[in-house]
Each structure stands twice: as structure tokens, then as C-alpha cells.
Image (tube, rainbow, N blue to C red):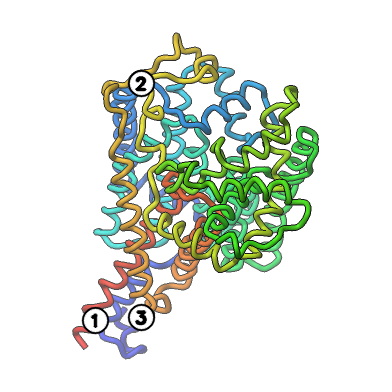
Amino acid sequence: MAKIAIITGAGPAALRGRYDLLKCASVPKQGSIAVFYTYVWENKKNKSYCIASAIMYLLQFIFFKLEYPFANYMPDSYFYLKAAASNADVNIWPVAYSKFLRLVNIFTHSDTIVVGLQYFFMQLAGLLFLFTLLHFIRPGRTVRTSLYIFFLLNPIALYVANYISADALFVGYSLLWFTSLTWIIFHPQPWMGAVHALLLLGCFTLRYNAIYYPLISVLAFSLSPQPWRARLVAIGLAGTLLFGFIWSASNKMKEVTGYFQFSAFGGWQLANNALYMYEHIPASKRQLPPRRFEKLETMVRQHIDTLNKVKMSHDDSIYASFYLWNAGGPLVQYMNREYKNDSTTSYFRRWASQGPLYFEYGRYLIASYPASFVINFMLPNAINFADPPSEFLNTYNLGGDSVLIPAKDWFQYRSLKVRDRNAKNAIMFYADWYSVFAALINLLLVINMTGMLFFKLLKMQPQPVAKWTILCLSLWTLNAVFSIAASSIVLRYQLFPIVVEWCVALIIGEWIYKHQPKNNNK
């Protein structure tokens, strides 16, 4: 140390500080997986946290199920259950979750087992992401403790996992996918490209919200230190799997509905978004549509001109989904009129057959009135992004005391009646508080990003840490763009980004805090 100090001209104390910084920020060069295992399991503090986490997760799950002994249900749940019962290859939502239900059903009909598998999978994925982050980033004690508490005592995981829905598995797979990208940036191995491709495919088969994930993956490989040939091979493998999945799903959709399309929901969603804008266009300023939209346009204008007679509920307005599902909306009415004299075609085929038309119609409206779309759809959606509504998460079983027949039959309940210990009050207030927490995280991240740019802190970090931070902020940006411009925003869709945002916001905040005393001393 003394010899190095003489050569560099730095004092022993300053040199020791630089040495400690480099030591903490260094990336293991050999045996990274073995080093990671040692860090997690042979480090006494980390091992104790793992054991404590396992105990706490189990106790939280037990107490939660004593309070809510039955699984929770939302409208989506019954689509999943019907697809599982019929072993459908296409559905309104991706069918991977229905296949998961069928797999569990081979061994047990217990809804508690399903909920437990979802909960512990999501928590295990969270722990793996946490220790990967701590292994490579090495934040200070305050940030590390905050992250420990967040991943250990965050009850929103119980509420999400208790739903018969793909959300818990999607959050878990998303965390594993992002963990793989973290490894690819810090210490890539040849086999990690294949693991990443499978995890990305898993996300795609669970929720359409993964539509922007490939862009994040391409960015991660672009930032990775591995040779370009290895990067291109990994990107090509992931692209091949995704293309194969999309092609297969589109062909199956054609077999069932007669239309080659990956997801009919995309068409319905686009038309729904456009109609939230179109209802604000005065009659005198509406353009004549192309002939193929004439019948649909007529019904839409009739609806808009009598909008005060078709009252949107508070939820329909907040979640921006009225035109997707409401029988009083023109999209559902048009579908019903098209099949008015047809009693044999299944509901799903009727619904899916409108996807291509609604996609073209929605695109036409948005292209015709782009400024109005920004003001009347994207701006309210941006508010929802900043403070995501809790939607179904704050209510047990939609506020009712019974489930529908598909749930009773699948899980073999004795009756349609379900209960909780507080049957008179089905509202679960914690979900509403978590929406406030999510809003504060968004605010904290924006403030800390501003501070990071102002003090130019990114340039002061080790290169892998800077690249990982860029990846996290890109995830936040793309998620914001996708959510605000093309999606209905609710809390359960934002749970995975919230986890990443919280972690990176704390880390950047620590940079800012440590930067200030240096400036003051000067």
C-alpha cells in the first residue's frame, strides 16, 4: 500500500478509501456463481436473512390464509378457469396460466396450494433479485436495510398471490428475467443467453404487458461486456423463441376464430383507448370514416350523442376500460349485433373475430385526432401511472360472498359460498395504501434522477453499475410509455416495475447523499 502511495502521490488514507471503493465495486472475474453462492449462503448475515425470510414468509402466509381461507377472484379469474377446464390453446388472455392450473390440478384441487405456489415462487424470485443486486452493487447499510425490510415485510405479495390470476407468476418471472439481465451486464456466462431467452418467453406467455421486454433485453446485451458475436447469438435465440411463440399462437387463433392474429385483445384495447378520446370530439368536427367502418361508426356516434344516458361507473372512468367490457358500450353492442341470429358460435370466437376490425378502427381514430388522443387519453392515463388505482386488489372476492360455478367446480368447493373472517367488510385497505406508496416511489425516482443528472453522478460510478442504472431507468421509461399510451393502468400491472424503481431510487439517493458532504468540504 505504501509503495503504491509513493508512486501515485496519494496519501495512505485517501488511497485506502479508493482501494475500499474499488474493492466494493469490483466484479468477480472467476467462478462468479460460486462467489455468489458463498456471498448468499456462507455469509452469516445473509444466511440468517434467508432463514428469517423463509420463516417470515411461511408465518405471513399462514396468518393471511386464516384471515382469507379462500382464493380471491376477479372477472379475469373465470376466463383462466374456463380455459383450463377446456384445455384451450387460445383465450382472451395468454393461456400459460391456465396450463399452470391444469398442472397443479393433476395433484390437487386445493386453491390454497395454488395460492401458496404463486406466493412462494414470487418471493423466491424477489430474494434472488435482491441478493443479485446486493452482490454486485454493494449499497450502504441504510439502503441495504431498507431493501431487506421491503422484500421481507411487503404484504402486497400476499394480496396478489391470493388471486386466481397470472399476476403473481408474471411478477415472479419478470423478476427472474431482470435478474438474468443484471448478471448479463455484470458477469455474463455463455449459458445465460439461453436462460434469459426461456425467462423472456415465460413472461410473454403469461401477460401481454411483456410486449416491451425485448427492447430492454436488447439494451442489456448491448451494454454487456461479452463479445458481440455472443450477444447477437443470445438476442437471436430469444428472438427465435418469441417469433415461434407468436407464430404458433397466431395460427391457433386462426384455427379457432378464422383470423390470423396474435391477440384479439390488442384490437379491443386500441379501440377502447381511441373511444375515450373520440367521445370528446364535437359532432361538427368528426370526419367521415372509411366505408368499412360505417356500421361501427354509426353505433359509436349514437352512443356518444347519448353518452349522458349510458353512465360510466367510477371504476370504468378510473381504469379506462368501459369500452372493453361494458354491455352498454358500442364495441360490445356491435359484436352482439353481428351475431344476433347466431346461437352456435362461442363467445370467445365472437369476441376474437372483432379484434382485427377494432384494431384498424382504433388506429384510424388515433391517426385522425392525435392531439385529442394525447389530451383526453394519455394525460389522464399519465395521472394513473403516477398513482396507479388499486382496482380489484382492495376488495375480497369483488365484495361478494359467493363465487361462480367455474371456481366451485375447479376447486371442488362444497358450495358457491366463500367466507372470510370479516365477511361484513370485504375491503382490504392495504392495497389502497400501496397505491400511495407507488406514487411516492415514482416521485422519489424522478427527484433522484434529477439530482443524478444535475451532479453528473452516473459518470462517477463503476461502469457496470452505471450500465445497470441505465437499464433500470430504461425499464421505467418504456413501461411509462407503453402504459400511458396503450394500456389500462392498474396497480397489479405495475408491481414488478415498482420493485425495480424502489431499488434504483434508493441507490441513486445514496449517491446524492454521499456526494453532498464532499462538495460542502470543498
Residue most extreme to the left: 521
Q: CA distance from mark 3 to mark 1?
A: 15 Å
Asked if the residue at tag 1 contacts the one at tag 2, i.e. Cβ–Cβ closer than 8 Å, the answer is no
Residue 195 visible somewhere in the drawing? no
Residue 505 visible somewhere in the drawing? yes
Numbered tag placed on residue 518 in the rendering: 1
Crowd tier of the residue under label 1, counting other residues whose Cα lies within 10 Å: few below 14, some 14–19, many 20 or above: few
Question: Closer to the camera: disc 3 or disc 1?
Answer: 3
Crowd tier of the residue under label 3, counting other residues whose Cα lies within 10 Å: few below 14, some 14–19, many 20 or above: few
The quarter of the rendered structure image containing the N terminus is bottom left
Amino acid type at mark 2: Pro
Q: CA distance from mark 3 to mark 2?
A: 51 Å
Instruction: Say whether residue 311 is left or right of residue 189.
Output: left
Mark closer to the chain start, 3 or 2: 2
Amino acid type at mark 3: Phe
Which SS class for mark 2? loop
Amino acid type at mark 1: Lys
Numbered tag placed on residue 58 in the rendering: none
Q: Nearer the viewer, residue 426 or 439?
A: 426
Which SS class for mark 3? helix
Q: Which residue is mark 2?
A: 69
Q: CA distance from mark 2 to mark 1?
A: 55 Å
| Residue 153 position in % (x across, y down) | 29, 42
Instruction: Say whether residue 211 is left or right of residue 441.
Output: right
Q: Which residue is mark 3?
A: 454
| Residue 328 position in % (x across, y down) | 55, 38
| Residue 346 position in % (x across, y down) | 70, 26
